[in-house]
Image: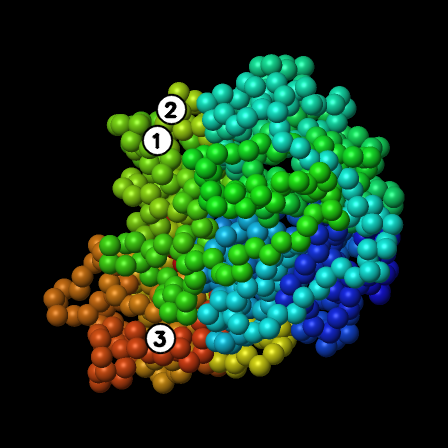
Amino acid sequence: MNIEELYVQATGHGPFPYQAVFAESQMLPDVLAVPTGTGKTAAVVLGWLWRRRFASSEVREQTPRRLVFCLPMRTLVDQTELVSRGWLERLGLTEEVSVHSLQGGAVDATWDDAPDRDAILIGTQDQLLSRALNRGYAMSRFRWPVHFAWLNNDALWVMDEVQLMGVGVSTAAQLQGLRESLAVARPALTLWMSATLTEGKLHTVDFKRPLTQLNLEDEDRENGTLSRRLNATKTIAPAGTPFDSKSAKALAAEVIAAHTPRSLTLVVVNRVARAQALAMALRKQASHLDVRLVHGRFRPADRKQMELGVLSRSVSSASERKAPVGQTELFDDVGIDETGSGSGGGFDGILVATQAVEAGVDISARVLFTELAPWSSLVQRFGRCNRSGELAAGQVRWIDVPDDEAAPYEPSDLELARRRLDGLSNVGPSSLPSFRDNDTPSLPVLRKRDLLDLFDTSTDLAGHDVDISRFVRTSDADKDVQVAWRTWDGDGSPPVDAPAPERHELCRVPVWQAEKLVKASKDKACWRWDSLEGAWAKVERLFPGLVIVVPREFGGYDDKLGFTADPKDLPSVLVASGPSPDHDESDVLTQWANRYVTLAEHANDAAQEMRTLGARLGGADPWPLLERAARAHDLGKAHPVFQAMLTARLPDDDARRNAGPWAKSAGGGGGRSQRKHFRHELASALARMAQGAEDLEVYIIAAHHGKLRLALRSRPGEKEPPLAATRFALGVWDGDVLPETSLGAEVVSPELVLNLEVMELGDGPSGPSWSARMSTLRDDWGPFRLAYWESLVRVADWRATRLHTGAQSLDIENVTPFTQAGHHD
């Protein structure tokens, strides 16, 4: 299939010239600089699909398996996911290419066990950049390294609407520069997309090479459909109502007077509180109109109700469109009503929004009101009016904002935009003057040392993690916690078996506002899941990325207004029915089996799965070493403590008590470990170290659950050995004996004594310390390759476990863990 045929099948017509160039070029550009509404999403998604599935073998090898679409806000994620699924459906590729959404607290566990499969990952910068920094927001800390591996290897990053990303742009640039300097296991590329990006914003300390850029050419501008869009007329004038931070009544009256029946009127303001006040005023003054409110402080379930019919549309309806509308879909991504109403899919009413609709959102208003904002933001807002040139003229009215109300923007940025608006009468794409904005990276800039420090996922001695929010978002207002409102019996913590917080019930709340709400609650507490203790813990300090559960009585949320911070506003309680959260003594993807599985059988299975991965992925990775690591990864399960745990609940006369050694117990067969925090992977690693294995193999074995990596130390509350002088860590005691153990394929590990000398600092009789060995590995191989290899062994382990579950996959969303019974892997 050539690129022309692919576009025709996916959209109903062929590509624009620049879209064909993007797909067919030998090397992808660094920057795609085309105006809003000219088909960037289609260019990237369909171009990547063609390169991965239909191009020459050389191009396919150079094109990463994962397309990582990074966006500044959740609205864009929903839209991009929708159209991507529609295109895949029309191309018949839904079985070959998967699509996954990462946004607003969603922990998607259906893609990270398939590094050998083509996938489109679409998410917000918070979710994706935090994962790329090995501190994934709203997910199990023990799976951080897997997402870190897959997002920094074999991944094509697309940074879309970068003018809204702030410091995220600098972080993405630095990550790309560090991938190129520290080396990756598979190609990892980054593409920046924006009509207003200046190249200097990308030139960070480790990313200074010349950048290639793809722009529109004359051949593109002469295309009839694209020409109509580029030459759309959008008249502009100041609004008649001056800015008033205390009252929205006058502006509501002007908006109602400007609204044309059977069309969309869009009002974009800069703060959530003003959007809420304006929506309430509009609903009061014009009860006959459909008034919707969209901003980033809604729970997804409530926001979807607001977006229904305005910003969202079902995949099936999109895929059933005929070719003429498909032509519009290529540029609008979900389609704009071509009747001339300019209503964004036929919506009749008024939409009040914040920056949530500023970029890429597929709506076309007949009338647009917008508060003054930085110039790049205004250009994006103008793109929501008469978007495809379907009207003779759209109308834009701008509202001046005084300096003391400039937040979340800088007064100087608003003054610059004010000067640029002076004298403009038309803000259509072809009529906008070209300006050069700030050409330096946003601060702070991620440094190499920061990344290397983040590779170690251990908490500090106080149990705290490194705060990465300064590398993800610029504004303090965008440093959020995720909040779920629930009810439960009693005044204490949620029940230990309560479901993990789920995406549909989580609302993003700025840390400072959450702190005020907590103070106002007085005697009520908010709760987080403590993965180390396997229990709900009272929150003593809020920090960005934290997921908390609060009683409904906390208030602060209205279903139709979103987060209000008013304790009098009580939300409805949304049902959550998923599994309990992950914790230190649980790994859902490796613990579940439908029968007892011997260690030798599981070792054989894991080694075979690693061979299969090697055959599918190819490349120059150390496959023999990885296969050895996969075979030996569970050797430590032969430890008497682990075997006792696996058989604890079997009847005394059950023959399985004296058989084995076992790697897996049947569901419900296991009990609690005699030693709290016992980690069999440490025993495995120490055994292989004693047998002379390379440090790389030792590290990979130790890291295969994400709970032992660079730091080796005891955990609080561990059971100590009888002799006070005996070293101990993670339930393993110095001098423990590991019996002779078969690992299948005639591989036998002899009996040996475990030695914990390496947990001491400095060189000892056993050589360098654990910390020194692992830090040297990180520096020699680089964090990206090291994470990639450890994650391959984890996937081999997951897939080997799946062979004995009777399930097609082990989706963490759908498998009930045995953690409450004390069973662990």
The first of marks 3 and 2 along the sequence is 2
Identified at 63% across, 31% down, the residue is 238
Q: Is residue 204 visible?
A: yes
**Distance (Cα) linking label 1 and label 3:** 43 Å
Q: Position of residue 177 (x, y in %)?
A: 51, 70
Extreme-front residue of the structure: 423
Tell me: 7 left or right of 274: right
Identified at 82% across, 58% down, the residue is 220
Q: Residues within 10 Å of mark 3 (few under 14, many from 20)?
A: many
Whether pointer 1 and pointer 2 mark residues with C-beta atoms closer than 8 Å, the reply is yes
Q: Position of residue 491 (x, y in %)?
A: 29, 28
Q: Where is the N terminus found, in terms of image quarters? A: bottom right
Query: What residue does disc 1 label?
Result: 517
Query: Would you identify the image quadrant in which residue 490 lies?
Result: top left
In depth, the one of 603 and 50 nearer the eye is 50
Which amino acid, by three-letter code, is at mark 3? Met
In depth, the one of 578 and 176 nearer the eye is 176
**Distance (Cα) linking label 3 and label 2:** 49 Å
Query: Would you identify the image quadrant in which residue 690 lies?
Result: bottom left
In depth, the one of 99 and 447 nearer the eye is 447
Colouring mode (rainbow / by chain / secondary structure / one colour):
rainbow
Which amino acid, by three-letter code, is at mark 2? Pro
Query: What residue does disc 2 label?
Result: 567
In depth, the one of 29 and 566 nearer the eye is 29
Position above or below: 477 against 272: below
Q: Residues within 10 Å of mark 2 (few under 14, many from 20)?
A: some
Tell me: 463 left or right of 177: left
Extreme-left residue of the structure: 724
Whether pointer 3 and pointer 2 mark residues with C-beta atoms closer than 8 Å, the reply is no
Identified at 22% across, 54% down, the residue is 717
Q: Position of residue 585 (x, y in %)?
A: 36, 55
**What is the number of the mark on residue 774?**
3
